Image: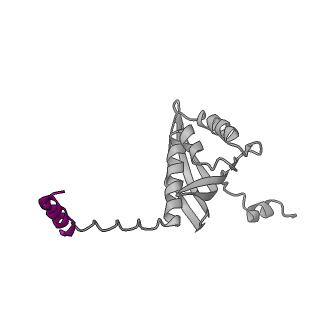
Amino acid sequence: MTLGAFALSVALAASPKAPAAPPAPPAPPVDPVQALRDGVKDFLSRYAAKDLAGVVALFEPRAPLFLGTDLGESCNDLPCIQELLSDRFQVWETATISDPARIHVEAAPPLGTAWFDTELDARSGGTRRKTKLRFATTWRLDGTQWKMTQVLLAVPTVGQSGKEILRQNELN
């Protein structure tokens, strides 16, 4: 190595280096309640669009449960849920679902629940049918994604409360 090359290498080593870029700030923590509310909206959007693969993808594959409005609608694996949803989706040609109402979310990661009412406005042929739906869902945090583990679907009734039933069965 020549004296000039040596001097150059010493000079380069001693020269100030460009300051390192500051580390990226950590991502803000995701609010689990908001994440579940977003999950509910995503579920309803996919459900109304008859997006079978999309709805099934929201389920936790190891231990899913879907209980429908009929006693026979009880599924505890993804193929059964896929069949149940496929049958449901054949009932309408197009549908919209209202934003969830009376939504109640509890989250204590890794588990969370979301209960809510919504309205399905379905059209098939020239027929339009609006149906109130009530969902109770349980979610499990899988890494960074919330996955549904349980869905209970009910069609709420009017005039079938305990008080109404008692009134109808009073002995006169």
User: Residue 6 location in percent, x, y?
Assistant: 17, 62
Q: Name the image quarter holding the C terminus.
A: bottom right
- Which residue is at 67% across, 36% downward? 83
Residue 104 lies left or right of residue 73; in this view the side is left
Is residue 126 inside the magenta stretch?
A: no
User: Residue 46 location in percent, x, y?
Assistant: 52, 44
Coloring applied to the structure? one colour
Farthest residue, direction left:
4
Q: Nearer the viewer, residue 85 or 107?
A: 107
Against 62, is 80 above or below? above
Q: Name the image quarter holding the N terminus.
A: bottom left
- Which residue is at 62% across, 58% downward? 140
Against 93, is 67 above or below? below
Start and end of the magenta stretch? 1-16
The answer to which quarter of the image holds residue 113 is bottom right
Magenta segment's dominant SS is helix
